[in-house]
Amino acid sequence: MEVKDYCNNIQMELNTWKARLYDIIRKIDLASPADRQKMQGDIDSIHQIVSDLDSRVEDLRVNCPENWEAQRGDISARVGSLSEKYEELWHYPGLGTDTDKPAA
């Protein structure tokens, strides 16, 4: 796969994750202040992962290196971390059930 194609694909995946995160943050906004405080570390972590992924994808897009497998592995690992954090947040009491959770 060409690096530009990969960047386009991963950018679409990131946009999907951002939509999922927006949905869960809307639910968090309705939680009690105490519950929101408990989740703040995970929320901050998710925002950092998304920002990091945006930066890495943009770097690949701009530089188009011939050997980019290492970056691809790093990006895949970060997407995995994002998925894990999403699952952790989703299971906080009062945020939802598995029947109303968007697919990860």
Image (cartoon, helix red, strand yellow):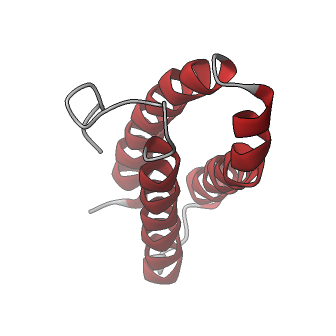
Give the residue drawn at x 64%, y 50%: 46
Residue 70 place in picture, x, y as percent: 50, 83
Image: 73 above or below 55: below
Give the residue drawn at x 51%, y 45%: 92
Image: 36 above or below 85: above
Give the residue drawn at x 47%, y 73%: 77
Q: Residue furthest left?
A: 99
Quadrant housing the N terminus: bottom left
Residue 97 place in picture, x, y as percent: 30, 33
Number of numbered discs on residues: 0
Q: Residue 6 versus residue 43: which sits nearer the camera?
A: 43
In the shown orientation, is residue 48 left or right of residue 69? right
Image: 95 above or below 59: above
Residue 15 place in picture, x, y as percent: 47, 32
Q: Residue 33 versus residue 29: which sits nearer the camera?
A: 33
In the shown orientation, is residue 78 left or right of residue 49? left
Quadrant housing the C terminus: top left
Q: Residue 99 versus residue 6: which sits nearer the camera?
A: 99
In the shown orientation, is residue 47 left or right of residue 64? right
Residue 39 place in picture, x, y as percent: 69, 46
Q: Residue 66 versus residue 103: which sits nearer the camera?
A: 103
User: Which of the 4 quarters of the picture holds residue 35?
Assistant: top right
